[in-house]
Amino acid sequence: MVLGLRTVIYHLSDLQRAKTWYAAAFGVKPYFDEPFYVGFNIGGFELGLDPDTTEVAPGAGGSVARGPEARSRGYAMMHDDAHG
């Protein structure tokens, strides 16, 4: 279970197409709109579009950042599993 999800960033090759699609899908305009990054606030959460695909393949996947409370719980869960 993921708790405290804050940010999802998608790496893609066609920023304009993705920006148009996400704006229509969620009915919001980006709050940050630059050639190097487009950010949407979707219900208080960050949906980021990153056109830099030099180190990652565009498409399914991306980066996920969770809040500190989720990291602490996640670490505790992994630590407990690893150390019985």
Image (cartoon, rainbow, N blue to C red):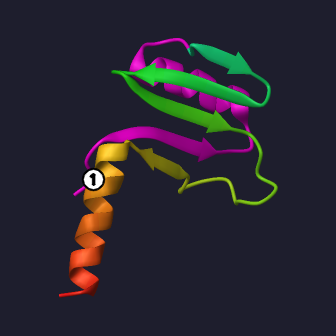
Q: Residue at x 46, y 46 (%)?
A: 65
Q: Is residue 6 above or below residue 26?
A: below
The residue closer to the viewer here, 81 or 5, is 81
Q: From the viewer's perspective, is 45 left or right of 14?
A: left
Q: Label 1: how many residues lie within 10 Å, few (<14), some (14-19) or many (20+)?
A: few
The answer to whether residue 50 is magenta is: no
Percent coordinates x, y for residue 23 in the rendering: 51, 19
**In the rendered view of the protein, which quadrant contains the C terminus?**
bottom left
Q: Residue at x 79, y 25 (%)?
A: 35
Q: Is residue 73 above or below residue 47?
A: below
Percent coordinates x, y for residue 28 in the rendering: 46, 13
**In the rendered view of the protein, which quadrant contains the N terminus?**
bottom left
Q: Residue furthest left?
A: 84
Quarter-of-image position of residue 6: top left
Quarter-of-image position of residue 71: bottom left
Q: How many marks?
A: 1
Element type where label 1 sits in the image: loop
Percent coordinates x, y for residue 46 in the rendering: 47, 30
What range is drawn magenta here?
A: 1-29
The answer to whether residue 17 is magenta is: yes
Percent coordinates x, y for residue 31 in the rendering: 57, 13
Q: Amino acid at mark 1?
A: Val
Q: Residue at x 77, y 45 (%)?
A: 52
The residue closer to the viewer here, 84 or 24, is 84
Q: Which residue is mark 1?
A: 2
